[in-house]
Amino acid sequence: MPPKKTAAPKTPKAKAAKPKAATPRKKKAAAAPGSAGIAAAACLTGTPSAALTAACELVERLGGVVAARYREPLGGHWVALAVLPIEKVEATPYQRELSPTHAERLATVIPKVGRFLDPIVAVPSGDGFHSPNGMHRLAAMRRLGAQAITALVVPEPEVAFRILALNTEKAHNLKDKSLEVVRMVRALVADAATRDRPESELQLELEQPGFLTIGVCYEQNGRFSGGAYMPVVSRCEAWSDRPLREVLAEREAHATQLLALDEAVNEAVQRLKDSGFASGYLKPVVVARINPLRFVQAKPGQPVRGDFDAVMTKMLAGAKAFDPSKVKAADIAMAAAMGGGSDE
């Protein structure tokens, strides 16, 4: 009889590694009821600040009316509720571009209520007022032919920058935010009173140091693929204690390098297309492959930081030497699945 076949021993299956559970962020404890700000009755007490008095005089000089002067209830700062001639109010010149669709939608909705019930914020600016958060409402009211607009007048012009940073009227994309930041910085540098402020004092207003560099790139090329480069730029730019005017000059130089790199990356992308690849995610693939910081491990409690000039030099050399034969279809599919920085 033929010998019985012995079954091969079963190889134990490797257990799939369980993904680490994300550590939940601790929520900031809510303040005790009634522990912040001032009481309602205290909002009308005291003498208005000299800055508010000057702002109210400007309102009346322009043909507007001041409906009330009061201390806002959280910080106790003096503000005024006023009605301003609409031609005397403009959006701050350093915020994002107007969305005609959003403004048209507001112009359609406001008449249904029959009332304008959402005052804009206005700060004094020369012989008029600037609004850091009312661009679309101003546009909508102008479309409706309004003569005047209700505003909360804040006498301190610097507050406009902070309000702009916290503006959630219309969500920003990277291009919107970066352009807003660079315009804000240019306005601050143009003012002798603020051009020497350290950049590090403006972290609330600017949010990330990389936005300034990316914003300069968008100024020069409206189709710049900021999303592909932001992960690199954010690891190379850091808050500076130097004067804002010096920082702006440095970031402009960085943007020049980044735009030169982008040209070389575009050439590498074209080589990929010539090899038969067709996808809107070719640029992120190229940028990721030539990024020298891609696999650098961060030390505990310390973010990965790279020298901008050195990183750009390495990436430029990598883009020029990029070999499309080393890219697989799976690499493009993975980039698409992650959704990072499409170049379309």
Image (cartoon, rainbow, N blue to C red):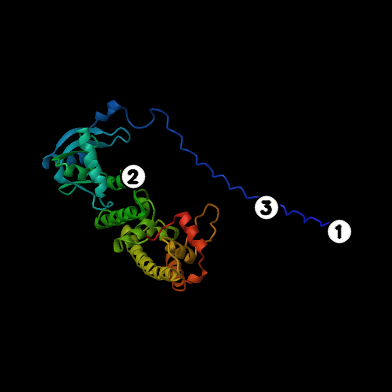
Quadrant in which residue 315 is drawn: bottom left
| Crowd class of label 1 (few under 14; some 14 to 19; many from 20; radius 10 Å) | few
Q: Give the alpha-carbon distance from disc 2 to disc 3, as whole Å.
A: 49 Å
Q: Nearer the viewer, residue 111 or 120?
A: 111
Residue at 29% over, 27% down: 40
Evaluate if marks 2 and 3 touch, with contact meaning CB atoms under 8 Å apart: no
Q: Position of residue 263 (x, y in %)?
A: 37, 69
| Crowd class of label 3 (few under 14; some 14 to 19; many from 20; radius 10 Å) | few
Quadrant in which residue 339 is drawn: bottom left
The residue indicated by pointer 1 is 3
State which mark lies toward you, 1 or 3.
1
The residue indicated by pointer 2 is 166
Secondary structure category for the residue under label 1 = loop
341 vs 2, left or right, is left
Evaluate if marks 1 and 2 touch, with contact meaning CB atoms under 8 Å apart: no
The residue indicated by pointer 3 is 14
State which mark lies toward you, 2 or 3.
3
